[in-house]
Structure formats: C-alpha cells, structure tokens
C-alpha cells in the first residue's frame, strides 16, 4: 500500500509532511517519482495525467483536489470500482463566495452599461436598485453553490436556489428537480450557475432555458464551460433578451483568441480566476479521507457514479 501525491511542489511538500505526521507508517510517493505502480492504492490527484490511472492496478481511492470531478467520473482509464472523494472544505470556499458576490454586483449595478458609457464619455443613469429588489437564482446548491447562495442572501439579494434534490435553507426559496426549473428560471434576474457537470446538466444554459429567464436577465457561469451553449448565449445577448453575461469557465481553456466571447461587448471573460485554494484548506479533508479509508469507514464527499457527481 502506498499513497501517491500529485501536486505542485509547495502543496506536495505540505501534504507529504501532513500525511507523514498523521500516519507515520504510510509509504508516501511524490509524483513523478511513483516507484512500483502496483504498490499505489491511494492517489491525491490534482494533475492532468488522465492515463496514469490505467497503470495503477491496485488503485482503490482517488482524492480530488478539485471541486469538479466530472473529468474523473468520465475517465475511461479509471476503473468503476475506484472510489472518488473530494478533499474540498465542506463549508465552501470564501474566495469563491467573494467572487460570486463581486460578479453579481457587477450585473446588479449595471457595470456593463457604465463601462460602455465611460468609453463614450457619456454621463448616464442606469437605474440602480437596492439588492433586496433583485432576484438572483443560484443553480446548484452543493458545497460551493450553497455557500455562495448564503453569501448573496446575507448581502441582501432575493436569492433562490435550484438543485436535484430538495434543500431547505432559511431566507432562501429552494426549488428542485425538472418540474420546478421553469418557475425558478422565470424569477431569476441574475442567473448564477454552480451545478455539477453531468449528462443531465451539460448544455443546460441553452436557447430554450435562456428564453425562460426574464427579459434583461444576466448570466454568470462559474460551473463548467460545458453547461453553456456558447452560440445560444451570444444569440440571446444579441437579441437583447439577455442583458449581459460573465463567464469564468469555458469548453476550451485557455479560451482561444478567436472565440467570439472575447470581443463581445456584453460578455465579460474571466480567465477561470474564481479561486486558488490554499494547500492548508484541503489538508483536513485529505487527512480525514485517508483515515476513514484505512479504517474501513464510510468516506465523506464521495462521488456517486450513478448520479454523475
Ligand atoms: P457539488 O457539491 O457536487 O454540488 C453540485 C450541485 O449540483 C448540487 O446542488 C446538486 O444537487 C446539483 N445538481 C447536480 N445535478 C443536478 C440536476 N440534474 N438537476 C439539478 N441540480 C443538480 O459541487 P460544488 O462543489 O458545489 O461545485 C459546483 C460546481 O462548481 C462544479 O461544476 C464545479 O466544477 C464548479 N466549480 C468551479 C470553480 C471555479 O473556479 N470556477 C471552483 C469550484 C467549483 P443536489 O444538491 O440535489 O445534490
């Protein structure tokens, strides 16, 4: 049995020391120095080495440093028997909450209009409203999404969330499942996506669902690029039905220089800058998962392959 850590050098050092201190008997390997592949039963994964898993015959557990695990679930080299758990802090991510608030305020306070007016040296009144007169809809109320939704609620917005299963949260209207999706969309003046990427949610921000948003709504995508049908979003913004959009994630990253998003005056491209989790924020999750796995206990934040996240 051995644990392989795949991470940038600073994280690698931090986690090798933390795992070594907490589990003195563990055989710890640091990528790319993995030694005998058949020894490895746990990988702390953050890299882009999708084919590696096919070489690890005795792999039992992958601990993901990333919140999104769609690339692991869909990895053909990773056996279905291998458990996937997220190291993610279950309380959410403060940096992502800040970022979601920043971008929500950007649209709520008409910054696309104001920046365009600046460029024309024109003094405009964009018609500002208080936050409690703005309805924000958060798609996805998981670890990250619920934390963001709470932050927006606490900033005074009228927040609703939508998830697969029912959630209850004070001060927030919670919708769930396909039957309640249209009602959720119809009241979302700013739509913020934090869904997991699955076969059910791919392309969910398409022409039909954009048309269900109120006229003049804005869209913020912090989930995955594959949630948005790029051409449908551009058409909806050009038609004026959607006011503007901010995108942090893209089907291809970095976003190619010739992609129409770059030059669109009402689509703001952010180069996947939502957050940079510190090694320390993931360490407790990594240690907890290793401890439980070695003890044969149920694993926290484990992906359910059948539901796709
Ligand atoms: P999570 O804890 O797995 O939560 C996923 C959420 O999606 C849950 O609320 C889940 O519903 C909902 N969902 C899944 N399938 C659905 C469906 N068919 N219909 C309705 N709701 C559905 O994920 P997370 O950690 O919050 O992360 C959310 C997303 O943010 C991921 O796509 C991740 O990749 C992305 N992310 C982006 C950044 C960035 O830098 N931009 C950083 C971190 C995360 P239930 O609550 O019912 O399970």
Image (spheres, rainbow, N blue to C red):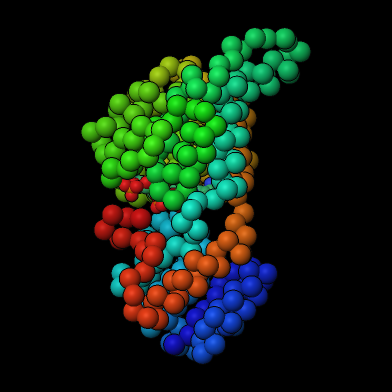
**Residue that lies at the very extreme toward the right in this rendered image:** 121
Q: Nearer the viewer, residue 95 or 191?
A: 95
Disc tally is 0
**Residue that lies at the very extreme toward the front in this rendered image:** 170
Residue ID at (58%, 61%): 281
- Residue 94 visible within the image: yes
Residue ID at (56%, 26%): 107
* Image position, residue 207 (x, y; %): 37, 28
Residue ID at (67%, 9%): 124
* Image position, residue 29 (x, y; %): 56, 83
**Residue that lies at the very extreme toward the left in this rendered image:** 179
Residue 174 against residue 147 in the figure, above or below: above
Picture quadrant where residue 227 is located = top left
Residue ID at (56%, 72%): 6
Quarter of the image with the C terminus is bottom left
- Residue 206 visible within the image: no
* Image position, residue 187 (x, y; %): 38, 23
Quarter of the image with the N terminus is bottom left
Picture quadrant where residue 306 is located = bottom left
Residue 104 against residue 22 in the figure, above or below: above
* Image position, residue 4 (x, y; %): 52, 79
Residue 185 against residue 90 in the figure, above or below: above
Q: Is residue 38 left or right of residue 6?
A: left
């Amino acid at each position: 049995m051995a644990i392989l850590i795949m991470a940038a050098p600073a994280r690698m050092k931090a986690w090798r020391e933390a795992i070594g201190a907490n589990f003195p008997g563990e055989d710890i390997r640091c990528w790319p120095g993995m030694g005998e592949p058949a020894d490895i039963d746990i990988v702390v994964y953050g890299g882009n080495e999708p084919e590696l898993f096919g070489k690890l015959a005795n792999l039992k557990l992958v601990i993901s440093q990333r919140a999104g695990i769609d690339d692991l679930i869909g990895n053909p080299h990773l056996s279905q028997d291998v458990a996937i758990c997220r190291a993610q802090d279950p309380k959410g991510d403060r940096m992502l909450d800040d970022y979601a608030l920043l971008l929500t305020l950007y649209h709520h306070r008409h910054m696309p209009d104001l920046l365009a007016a600046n460029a024309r040296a024109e003094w405009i009144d964009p018609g500002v409203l208080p936050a409690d007169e703005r309805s924000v809809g958060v798609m996805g109320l998981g670890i990250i999404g619920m934390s963001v939704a709470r932050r927006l609620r606490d900033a005074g917005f009228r927040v609703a969330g939508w998830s697969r299963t029912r959630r209850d949260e004070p001060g927030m209207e919670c919708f769930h499942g396909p039957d309640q999706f249209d009602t959720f969309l119809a009241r979302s003046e700013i739509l913020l996506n934090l869904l997991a990427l699955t076969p059910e949610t791919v392309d969910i921000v398409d022409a039909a669902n954009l048309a269900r948003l109120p006229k003049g709504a804005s869209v913020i995508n912090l989930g995955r690029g594959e949630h948005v049908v790029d051409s449908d979003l551009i058409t909806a913004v050009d038609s004026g039905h959607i006011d503007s959009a901010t995108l942090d994630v893209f089907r291809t990253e970095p976003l190619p220089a010739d992609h129409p998003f770059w030059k669109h005056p009402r689509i703001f491209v952010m180069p996947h800058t939502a957050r940079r989790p510190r090694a320390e924020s993931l360490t407790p999750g990594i240690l907890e998962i290793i401890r439980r796995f070695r003890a044969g206990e149920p694993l926290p934040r484990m992906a359910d392959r059948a539901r796709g996240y």
